[in-house]
Structure formats: C-alpha cells, structure tokens
Image (cartoon, helix red, strand yellow):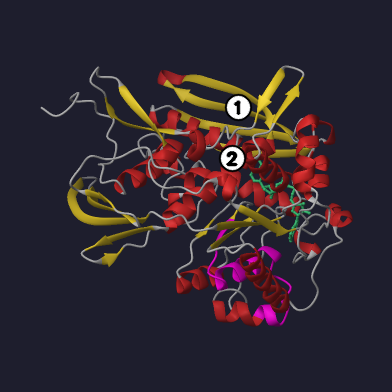
Amino acid sequence: MPVHVKVNSPKVTYESDFIKAKYCYESSSATQHPDGRITINPYTLDMDVTTAAKIPRTGLMMVGWGGNNGTTFTGMCLANKHNLTWHSKVGEHKADFLGSVSMIGTFPVGLNEAGEEVFAPVRHMLPMLNPTEMEIDGWDISNMNLADGMKRAAVFDWELQEKLRSHMEHLKPRKAVFFQDFVAANQADRVNNVLTGSKFEQMEQIRADICDFKKEKNLDKVIILWVGNTERFSEIASGLNDTWENLEKAMKASAHEISPSTVYAAAAILEGCAFINGSPQNTLVPGILELAEKHKVMIVGDDLKTGQTKLKSVLMDYLVGAGLKPESIVSYNHLGNNDGKNLSAPQTFRSKEITKRGVVDDMVASNKELFAAGTGPQKPDHLVVIKYVPYVGDSKRAMDEYTSAIAMGGLNTLVIHNTCEDSLLAAPIMLDLVLFLELFQRMDVKVNGKKIHFEMGQVLGYWMKAPLHTMTNSLFRQRSCIENLVRAALSLPANNHLFLTKGPI
Ligand code: NAD
C-alpha cells in the first residue's frame, strides 16, 4: 500500500529500498528498596531503525482454513479484492475491513496550524502489505471447499455468499495433522481429510505443503496462522517436549502428548515461517520456543483477543487505574458455532478458561496499594462460564458483571451485555496480526550496531488474550506499543499525550 505520510526530519531518510531512522529511545529502570523506597534511573539509547520498503510477495496459510474464522477471513479479503457489494434488509453494503487497526485505524501525529490534532491512517505511515494482494491457502480436517465452508459457517449475508461462491469454491484445504484426543469427541464427524504416518512424517508433509504453496504462488514469505479448534493442553515433561532435541525424538516416536498444533508450529519454524497461535492451547511448548530462538523465527501466541476479553482488559485498566478495587468478575458466554461445540468438552474449555482468566492478573499486580494485605480480597474472584447453544450460531453472547469496592464502603456494579458475530470480530484481528507481523519482520533495530531482538508476542499482545512474553494486558498500553514502534521507525518520539505546547517555540 502506498505511503502517504512523510516525516520532515534530517533523522529520517527515505530510500527506494529502506526507510532509515535515527531514534532516541528514552526510558527508565527502577530499584525497589526493602524499606519501600523506589529509585528511578532514567536512560537514553540512540537507536538505528531500518525498515525494508519493498513488500515481499506474501502468503498466509491457515490451519483450520475451512472453519468459521478461516472462511470469514478469506471471504472478507476476497470481497474487498473484488469490490463486492450486497444487500441486506437494511440496504446496500460495501466490502470493508472494519475492526482492523492496520486498514481502518489512525494514529495521532501532531497538531495543525489551528491547534487541532491530525490523525494519519495507519496503513499510510509505513509500507504495509495490501491484504487484497496476499495469497491464501491452508489445511483442514474436513475437505469441504471454502464456499461450502462459508455456507456452513452462516456468517455472511446470503447475497454476499452467492457473490463470493465463484471465488471460493475452487479453494480446498490441504490434508491436516489431526489427533482426535486433543479436541472434543463431538468433532469426529468433520474428519475426512487427514494425514497418516508418524508425527514426524506428518510434520515433514506440512513442510512440503509450505514449500509447494510458496513455489506455486511464487512467494517470498509465508506466515502460518492457527485458527483450528481449541485443543486441550498438552503435558510438558522433561525428555518429551522440553527441548527441541527431545521434541523431535518424541515426534519420531509419535509420543501421545505431542499435539497437532505443536507439529504445525515445528514445521513452520523449520521452513522459516512465522507462526501465530490464534487459539488458547499451549502449542508453544519449550522445545518450540527453543527452535524458534535458534532459527530466529517470530512466534506469536496465544488466543485471539476479540470481544469479551478485550473489553475486560479495558475495564480492568479503567477500574484499577482509577483506584477502584474490582472484587468480583463474572463472565458468561453462550455461542452456537463449532467453536462453542468443541468448547463444550471440559478439557478444551479448560484451555479457554485459562487464557480468559489470565488477563486481569498483571493489572491486579500493578497496584499494591489497592490489593494490600488487610484491606479485603487480595485479588478479585474471577469466574468464566461458556455454554454451547446451537440456536445462536456464530452470534456470541457475552455477559459480564464487575463489582468493585468504591470509597468508604460503597460498591459499584457494572453489567455488560455484548452480542455480535464472533468471526466478524476475529477476521480483522487475524488481518492485523498478519500485516503488523509482516511489517515488523522487515524492521531492524540496532543499538551501537548490535541488533535488538524484540519479542513479537509482546509487541502484538494487543490482539492476543495471553500474549507470549507479556509485559502488560492493558489494551491502551498494548496499542501504544504498536503506535510507538511505528513512530520509532519514523524517528518520532513516543507519543506522550501531554499537549504542553502547540508547536515549536
Ligand atoms: P471452527 O470450529 O469454525 O473452525 C476450526 C476449524 O479447524 C474447523 O474447520 C476444523 O475442522 C479445523 N481443525 C480442527 N483441528 C484441526 C487440525 N488439527 N488441523 C487442521 N484443521 C483443524 O472455529 P472458529 O470459530 O473458526 O475458531 C477457530 C479458533 O479460534 C478456535 O480455537 C477459537 O477458540 C479461536 N478463537 C476464535 C475467536 C472468535 O471467533 N471470535 C476468538 C478467539 C479465539
């Protein structure tokens, strides 16, 4: 996509192949003393941030391509590519990317002569992949073509489905790695498209599929995104998956506890492809982390942060930030899509419960004044309930109750009801993950000539329920992280929101 935003500074040079920025990183470290004193030590680092300006020919392979998220994402990209319009009972609609920071978001970039804030479209700040030019492929345990999968998902209006059919019916998922024990027994009736052989041999086939896709579409880069069913957690054990060497041996022996998602992750990393885990299970076992580190491949996890959890990370930020004390958080969901059906088994529900619950912990830990000993609960009671109700289909209902202690013995109870199509929230988030990951793969940050390795799991935490290597779950801070990294690539200081002056004095 063309870059319409230019920074007017001697510290930024726009070359045909690179955007080079001199960036002054200002931060602080802090020492906590046993007597409660805190000493803050500011520091400054001069960084060189170089972003490759040429966008590689990029392909996305989705695991679980034929499911609700896979078909909705593919349909959304194709509808935009072909500028499709359709009618619902309220009138005509045009294809869009609503819900995507990369495609529809803006970042504040300064004040104009009238003292008003100017907001630049995110996609015009740095060269970003155009989603309509991205090639898409994938795997599924069901051989249903993408058009029929879209119909089964029942997410898009019927006229849009009819217009998309000719663009999607020739798209057929590749054979999948599948071990029934990792998902609910009720998924068995979908299975007609799976690989055989040892777990290692199946991984080799996934690698061959990646190479085949790359060659067939003449691609420079492939990104792998897991949007398959939520799996149960796999056991982490020494000698099994604690190192890459052990994991490789375990795959050769087809060890029971090696999950399908871990097999895909290993194949992706060995092919040099970034891997994003859009579901809650512990795909990224220590052996996978070691392999990714060794091959310098970016991995991102876990679980897309779409509706209820996103709101939770905003509300917790607000309540704790305001000095109110959340003492009880109760989240109910009911949904009727295949995800809900799979989550009706206790072992897969458990994976989801863990990622949904973890989001409040760092915010509770951030305010020891609020949760100090002797002043009531040390952390909120936090309950998550998910029920499968086929009638509501993809239209998920989320009901939350937050009860907080307020001044002088008072209570504040917030009750929130959220209804919306789950996959239409997920698809733009999947797009953001792919587009920003692809951009950050092209970004190189050095201090004194030495490369800084930034954790992609942390940087892309805005879109993940349980970010790998997370520092914070606060949604505002996570979005600032993305914004400030884009600004760093343009030699702009981190946005301080101070408005002390209207311009240079
Ligand atoms: P879905 O059941 O419609 O799709 C999952 C697809 O994965 C199915 O087509 C299934 O056949 C396939 N599959 C299962 N195991 C596979 C394997 N080993 N290899 C290849 N394919 C496999 O579910 P969905 O609604 O698309 O959600 C997908 C995942 O995303 C779920 O884990 C869900 O929890 C997670 N998620 C979804 C949302 C959201 O939709 N808002 C939010 C967060 C996380």
Between residues 266 and 131, which one lies in front from this camera angle? 131
> Residue 324, image x and y in percent?
43, 27
Q: Secondary structure at mark 1?
A: strand
Q: Residues within 10 Å of mark 1 (few under 14, many from 20)?
A: some
| Callout 1: CB less than 8 Å from ligand 1 | no
Residue 428 disc label: 2
Direction right: furthest residue: 189
Above or below, comparing residue 291 to residue 464 in the picture: below
Above or below, comparing residue 13 to residue 291 in the picture: above
Q: Residues within 10 Å of mark 2 (few under 14, many from 20)?
A: many
| Callout 2: CB less than 8 Å from ligand 1 | no
In the figure, is residue 1 to the left or right of 153?
left
Between residues 201 and 472, which one lies in front from this camera angle? 201
Q: Bounds of the magenta span?
A: 250-276
Residue 80: quadrant of the picture: top right
Disc 2 versus disc 1: distance between alpha carbons?
Answer: 27 Å
In the figure, is residue 448 to the left or right of 221?
left
Disc 2 marks a residue whose amino acid type is Pro
Disc 1 marks a residue whose amino acid type is Glu
Residue 66 disc label: none
> Residue 94, image x and y in percent?
65, 28
In the figure, is residue 175 to the left or right of 459?
right
Q: Residue at x 87, y 61 (%)?
A: 192
Residue identified by numbered label 1: 401
Residue 174: quadrant of the picture: bottom right
Is residue 271 inside the magenta stretch? yes
In the figure, is residue 181 to the left or right of 109?
right
Whether residue 373 appears in this view of the structure is no
Q: Residue at x 49, y 58 (%)?
A: 56
